[in-house]
Amino acid sequence: MLLATLLARALARPSRPAATASPAGVDWLRHAAEISPSQLLDELGAHEEGLSEEEVTSMRAFWGENRLARAERPSLARRALAAFADPFVGILVLIAAVSVLTDWVFARPGARDLTTPAIIAVMVLVSGALRFVQGERSDNAAAALSKMVETTCDVRRADVGRVEVPVNEVVVGDVVHLSSGDLVPADLRLISSRDLFVSQSALTGESESVEKRRELGAAAPEGAAVTDLDDLVFMGSSVISGSAVGVVVATGAATLLGETASGLPSGGGRHATASEEGVARTSRLLVALMLVMVPTVVLVSGLTKGNWLDALLFSLSVAVGLTPEMLPVIVTCCLGKGAVDLSRDRVIVKRLDAISDLGAIDVLCCDKTGTLTEDRVALELHLDVLGREDAEVLRAAFVNSFFGTGMKNLVDSAILRRALEVDPTVEELCDRYDLVDELPFDFERRRLSVVVGDGSGSTLMICKGALEEMLSICSHAEVDGEEVPLTREIAAGVAERATELAERGMRVLGVALRREPAGVERLTTADERDMTLVGCLAFLDPPKAGAADAVEALRAHGVETKVLTGDSARVAAHVCRSIGIPADSVIEGAELEGLDDAELSRRARQASVFAKLSPSQKARVVAALRGDGHVVGFMGDGVNDAAAMGASDCGISVDSAVDVAREAADLILLEKDLMVLERGIVCGRRTLANMTKYVKMTVSSNFGNIFSVLAAATLLPFLPMSAVQLLLLNLVYDVTCTALPWDGVDDELVRAPRRWDEVSVRRFMVAMGPVSSLFDLITFAALFFVVCPGVTGAPWAELDGAGRALFVATFQAGWLVESMWTQTLAVHLVRTQRVPFVESRAATRLTALGAIGVALVTALPFTPLGAALDLAPLPPTYFVLLGVVVALYAAALLLARRLFVRRGGTLL
């Protein structure tokens, strides 16, 4: 019945498409803004006391979930198909198709055989299933961790009153309460508001906050954009200050943000992080190699063997062989395990790729308050302009903090607490005054003003803020109860005392009054003038006991800590010096504003402390450091930190942060402690090291195999390995490498920042690949001149068709087994700079999987499956030669490893 009622009401009002950027969506928002709240609630079938659970269910079924369409997870079927959408699978399918044509369609009736296509089908299933299972495990683990820090909002429900619900559970018709620091969960029409200021930068690109309060019945300006309508707030906006109650008029893809996002590419414009750029460069390197090697292999094989179809299929297999095709699986496994490991260290990962960025960080930018200090701000002094304790200054500050509607920060809490301790009767001021209007704090003005009335028509404007900014708006001072002009001498005395307090680590705010201010019905920044300075407040937030140890631990791991704060330069410098951060050169926001990008980059490289910064200036410092080649992490928890987190490679926040900061973060710390972050950085480096192991080992080994193939194609009268055999070798080897995420990493490999480095991959490939190729050629010679003639009873030139077939099958089996042995051994020799098997051992899981892989490939030529793959059993003499080759290979690889490291190469 409810659904039918909703449908009827929906048809009675302007239509609203679900997810298109058509004018109909904007028309509905304008309509919602123009009618009264009661009319809107009636049209939606909603109520001011909130929806019942039954109505919520019906609304969700009718209007859909509160999710952006492009953020939805693909269906299970799509994820399963994606697991098979891989170049490795594509080449296998192509080979299978050719095999069906040659072995069945065009074969003689008595010679038809589908064994090869059947084997390939099994390989496809194993490869795809492995990708799917590992992907699901990692995704599910990441989703479970994300739920621990999911964003919620405060809604009013008829059954239970006000409750916190996840943002994605909000429905059209919900009545939502907003307060400072909240993210707006959907498009809302305001029912009531109190000095509400929001940032709409995600929609409009404008950094300035805008006030949302329009008198009922006031007409919108002609031609005004929908974002300019005063009684609408939109998904993606954030509350800077004030509070409001609104009814949800659009959710998910039907919101203004959803309609805008539907026309944007995936990623939403987020800059590529250092990790993503490194992966992209490595991928380009591999693509370039394939573009060179594939045509070369086709030409050499085709010209020397005369079978161009076999040459083409083999060259495509070589291309797949050069590509670490299981890299997505290995990366996903490594990141998934890293996320679980980090959760044990009380770090929750929101973006899996951020783990590798965390390991690459070499500069950590953070705020001072709560990160380096105890986060327990205490009001130590309340002084008049002559530096004497004055209870009236404290009472004025109490009124300002009590009536301010923004989020009560630590400073406000300290004022309220101290005022009640000094004079419990101060609570009477709460009943004596009513709030008339307010100008909330922002990071440009650095102050907050309230206007209160006492019921008799008299009003009082009280402003508190950073002392320098307060002095700039004062023309008078209160001295011994009298209002006198604010002379240079008085101002200098106040500033001098503030400097002394700041050098003792105290933060100083000024307090000013203006009685009977004009224009109180609509207070603006222009009203903050001609004020009377009544005194100062001095706050102390001591450094954390473990902050110095954490800074030193980060420095020992190659991470430089830089402090970006809105506090004064002297307070920031005092705290930083006490915990071991150099503070000889402090850059303030006013100075930074006059620097061009090049000069800022140079200064940011040298300075460790930045003070009195606005949110945009914090983001600019972070961008300058990134532009200088650093991998930058930013740790913050306030509204003013979100922009800087977005500009960094890795945004870090805490679970107690405001919604805006938590949403912008890639990682959430469950403890606001740099030591927790230091452990997280080490975990990120271990994760990246294990991913790098796979890339370097596989690419260098396969690179060597390619030269072996080219040499064989030139020197041998047959291919050294068939396409199917080569792909099978790669599959078995890659499966053994899926244990790499569980492998240990030597301590020396996590002492310095790690990042994806395609130059290092190329150098490693060029240095180690030829070693593999050299021993492949030795194996070719042993097989061609010793082992195969021993099996067939004659050299190649003296054999007929059947003898040559056995010769080829024995040769290919021999190289297949040798390749598996040497590639697996290389994993253990190159995974560490220490003495392998003695000073550093691989994880049991990696060793066991490698041994199983070697055993299976070694046994393969002796099985029916091996016969179906045209492999012949190997004689005992082969295994004697194999032992010699493997031993010499190990010695040569260890020597190459030592030379490579001596010449400045990075092993991992």
Image (spheres, rainbow, N blue to C red):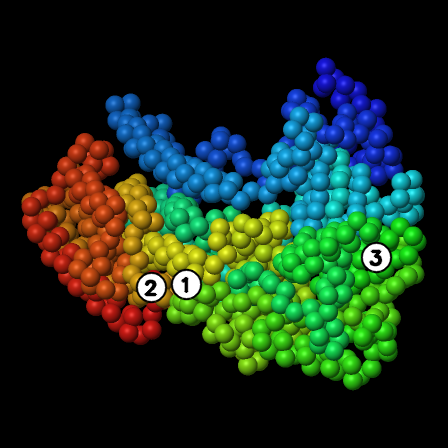
Badge 1 amino acid: Arg
Task: Say left or right for 747 vs 294.
Answer: left
**Callout 2 crowding tier (Cα within 10 Å): few <14, some 14–19, many ≥20:** some
Q: Secondary structure at mark 2?
A: helix
Q: Secondary structure at mark 1?
A: loop
Horizontal and vertical percent position of residue 655: 54, 49
Q: Residue at x 32, y 32 (%)?
A: 122
Which circle marks residue 451 in the picture? 3
Q: Residue at x 36, y 57 (%)?
A: 686
Total marks shown come to: 3
Q: Earlier in the sequence, mark 1 or mark 3?
A: 3
Residue 621 vs 218, above or below: the answer is: below
Determine contact: label 1, label 2, CB under 8 Å: yes
Res 791 quadrant in image: top left
Question: Which one is in front, 810 or 163?
Answer: 163
Residue 762 vs 140, above or below: the answer is: below
Question: For the N terminus, which image quadrant?
Answer: top right
Badge 3 amino acid: Val
Horizontal and vertical percent position of residue 61: 65, 25
Task: Say left or right for 199 vs 825.
Answer: right
Q: Which residue is mark 2?
A: 749
Horizontal and vertical percent position of residue 101: 37, 31
Task: Say left or right for 629 vs 764.
Answer: right
Q: Is residue 570 visible?
A: no
**Callout 3 crowding tier (Cα within 10 Å): few <14, some 14–19, many ≥20:** many
Which circle marks residue 754 in the picture? 1
Question: Which one is in front, 316 or 727?
Answer: 727
Q: Secondary structure at mark 3?
A: strand
Badge 2 amino acid: Leu
- Give the alpha-carbon distance from disc 2 to disc 3, as whole Å: 60 Å
